[in-house]
Image (cartoon, rainbow, N blue to C red):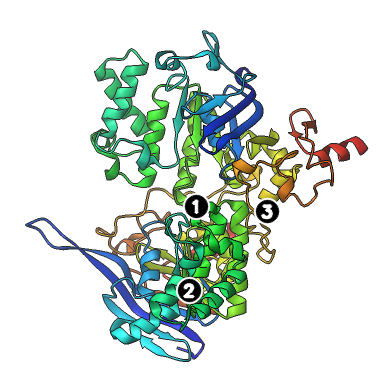
Amino acid sequence: MTRLLDVENLTLQFDTDEGRITAVDDVSFSIDQGQVMGLVGESGSGKSVTAKSLMKLNARNAVYGPQTKITLHLDDGPVDVMALRSAREMQVVRGGAISMIFQEPMASFAPAITIGNQMVEQLLIHTDMSKKQARELSIEMLARVGISDAAKRFNQYAFELSGGMRQRAMIAMALSTRPRLLIADEPTTALDVTIQAQVIDLMKDLVAEFGMAIIFITHDLGVIAQTADTVAVMYLGRLVEQGPVREVIRTPSHPYTRGLIAALPDLEHLDKPLTPVPGDIPSPLERPTGCVFHTRCSVAIDGLCQREVPQFTQLDDHHRVACHLAARERGAA
Amino acid sequence: MSDRTLITTRNLSVHYPLRGGLIGPRQVVRAVEGVSIEIARGSFFGLVGESGSGKTTLGRALLRAAPITHGEVIYDDGEVEYDLAAIDKAALKDYRRRAQLIFQDPYAALSPRMTVRDIIAEPLEVMGLTKSRAETDERVREIAARCRLNLEHLRRFPHAFSGGQRQRISIARALVSRPRFVVADEAVAALDVSIQADVLNLLKDIQRDMGLTFLFISHDLSVVAHVCDHVAVMYLGRLVETAPTRQLFARPRHPYTRALLSAIPSLDPDERGRAQKLEGEIPSPTNPPPGCKFQTRCPYAIDRCRKEEPELEHIGAEHNVSCHRWRELSEELAMA
């Protein structure tokens, strides 16, 4: 497998009126070409902020840690994303090598410009196509994602399309520049299950056809199980567990990952009571010391988890977990 | 109708007129069409379907918050009996206390300028249910405690709370007037999975302790499977199947129910691609297809389905389905 992206020691803070808030804390991961990585966690865990960092798309009050290093391995050689300054330099990644699709496609399309004109506009910026070529490619892409009457839809506005249709158009637009990496931020959360199944299928087909990598952000582990090759679980800005999808879902090793899986309603066992992860995610202003999860953890080790940040324990070649208890059990075994 | 039934609807329809152009026929959106259901007292009744299936409109019609175009809705809690289609003003005021609604989005449902105490107390004050401020405070504290909110919480404003806590505030507000019937419209859809289970457990506890009847509207079948004892599946304004939860999940009879069940993403990575995929999208309610409303997406549709609309048919203990082919399909699928 050829490496596409390396993220090393990503730390990101926001300067706010109430002080400096840590959104992402020392996160490292890699993605190979054509690989689908699931990024899981609840609201406030920092998953969207992490993904946006790859294009430096975060707000102006974002402060990146000095150790942060994001490297994109393109055909013309590696690109150091943190070193990119002007909007012009950024075009290599933004809409170039990386495209992004969002949860609410209605809010992501401009309401007063036709779908087609928005697709053509970005192609004119990122490629050296003529207007005519851009138009042809856009219609072809709309048809490719399963939109019937693509030539007609090309001239319509976002409000004229259904939710599922809009998300397809969003995908068509994101893929028309042939990105190497697609960031999909909760792309199916706003859709009905039947339409979600269609969009997931479509994304799988497109990975196979275009060979791009995907970062799939979601809070739904079922969607991850159906799409991803690898999973990274985030909690309060820290990666707590990562590994191949089968291993993480079958043998979850962090108490938080276990909690997420146990909280899912299980259709096979309707009598089983639902088990929530106790408590609420703490406010970013009151970040817990030591292991960030210890305030909600039922197996926290007294005196240790409150004080020391757990380092990663390697469970096997690719599966690792940041938990004192898992480290102890591993040491004892 | 048994004396154990809280809500009975007969042929309930909710239509909304659309302002058409100057020429051409006046169009009507048939949001709910010919729905007959019975909701037993003390039950947790689930209503599922995709966006546009009419589930929210049906819920609102039962609260008399949507116009009832045709049919009957009878409410009977043992103390009073109302025919909601023909209810007078005074009775409607009393019904508002007895039937409450919990909204989907706990961020939009709470006024940012009111303290949690005032938010929960508002229904009591508006409906004049308490005689003194002390009594109001007593009622607020009592319901807040049940929803696991403490005195400190009551003094704060909603912005200081997380999604799960806000939903508990919404629940307390809905319950403070001691209703008999509560419609929860996608009450956990906006919450994280880790918090969702907590709110669901709370709703179940409250329903049991206070003897409430819930209409639980959701698009998430796995959640419905866990909390509801009875489920109705809607498609394009019609009921397509109703059954006790276990029965529905073990032996779904309508092709749409089957498709919904198989579209739930499995947690097993080796189950990939096994789902029975549903093509296309739900048609517009202004222009529904002839015959069975599901025929445009149904993999088993035959000529008859395209011409003749199926009736809701009683096929077993509390199990009803509206499909011309349910019998032969269950045999076929059992063989396969």
Q: Chain of mark 2?
A: B
Element under disc 1: helix
Return the residue found at the far right.
A332
A286 sits to left or right of B45: right
In the rendered structure, find residue B182 and report the number of the disc placed on it.
2
Which residue is located at x 42 percent, y 90 percent?
B80
Q: Residue at x 45, y 48 (%)?
A: A190
Q: Position of residue A219 (x, y in %)?
A: 57, 45
Quadrant the N terminus of chain A occupies: top right
Q: Residue A224: where, in percent of width, then height?
A: 59, 41
Closest to the camera, between mark 1 and mark 3, is: 1
Q: Is residue A237 left or right of residue A125?
A: right
Amino acid type of the residue that numbered disc 1 sits on in the rendered structure: His
* Residue B70 higher or lower than A143, as above or below: below
In the displayed structure, would residue B110 be above or below residue B310? Answer: above
Which dot marks residue A277? Answer: 3
Q: Label for residue B159?
A: 1
